[in-house]
Image (cartoon, rainbow, N blue to C red):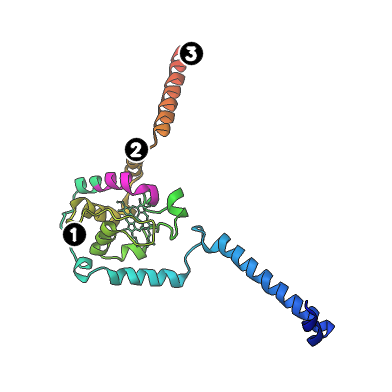
Amino acid sequence: MSLAVRGILGGDMRTAAVSAVIVAVLVAVCGIALMSVNGFSARSEPSAVERIVARLARRWAIPRGAANAVNPVPFSVETWAEGRAHFADHCASCHANDGSGRTTIGQNLYPKAPDMRLPPTQQLTDGELYWTIANGVRLTGMPAFGSGANDTDTWKLVHFIRRLNQLSPEQLKDMEALNPRSPAEIEEERADREFLAGQDDHKEDRK
Ligand code: HEC
């Protein structure tokens, strides 16, 4: 502390001033440290306000004609199967086969992949679902899948999303077989199959 300041401030005042500066610096350092720990982490949840504003902004961004569009692809058992296969291959890595969003990627994105079985997704119109799949959601992990044209495959995905709550255990199992695998995973599964087949052979021997 300079002589001039020492002259103006008494001893106690001086200590108080120094303490205030130290506290201010500490608060700033802690603030920056906290921001870099939490503020930029994809692990935190968006606040309720952020969620509501983001959803409203998205609904407003969808042109009214597109939001009111009616699914031109008639629903059938085949359409549903195609939708399941497409979803298992392209979407389940983030959204999970059952649409719950419970995957490693889906849960660690900011915002997280939503549980699409719940009302906030199911209350969207078919047109809004289609538009979201085709155009993606800016500043989120949701990519744009549309080719620009009125895409039949995307409309089949809309049928699929509408029926997430009706998926049977067998259908979910079929979807698992269609989930993308890395070459290492394919090799591991082959080795497991061989090992199990080998065990069966031994059982035969013991008979
Ligand atoms: C890389 C991860 C990822 C992939 C792959 C992905 N999504 Fe998404 N999706 C997200 C995230 C994250 C959100 C949430 C965006 C938000 O909060 O606004 C989302 C949102 C959505 C929504 C809107 C749900 C709602 O309630 O707002 C739909 C519909 C959707 N995805 C369908 C699909 C379909 C169909 C596919 C495959 C063709 C797909 N997604 C592939 C990450 C992904």
Query: N-terminal of the two: label 3 or label 1?
Result: 1
Q: Which mark is residue 71?
A: 1
Give the residues in magenta: 83-94
Label 2: state its secondary structure. helix
Confirm if mark 2 falls within 8 A of ligand 1.
no
Quarter location, residue 197: top left
Task: Say whether residue 117 is left or right of residue 148.
Answer: right
Determine the CA span between mark 3 and mark 1.
59 Å
Tell me if mark 1 has few (under 14), some (14-19) or many (20+) residues whose alpha carbon lies within 10 angstroms of its own: some
Residue that numbered label 3 is attached to: 206
Instruction: Answer with the quadrant where ligand 1 appears in the image.
Output: bottom left
| Residue located at (32% from left, 68% from top) | 58
Task: Say whether residue 30 is left or right of residue 61.
Answer: right
Residue type at mark 2: give it: Ala
* Number of on-image labels: 3
Label 3: state its secondary structure. helix
Residue 80 falls inside the magenta stretch? no
- Measured as percent of width and height from the top left, residue 191 is found at 43, 25
Q: Which mark is residue 177?
A: 2
Residue type at mark 1: give it: Asn
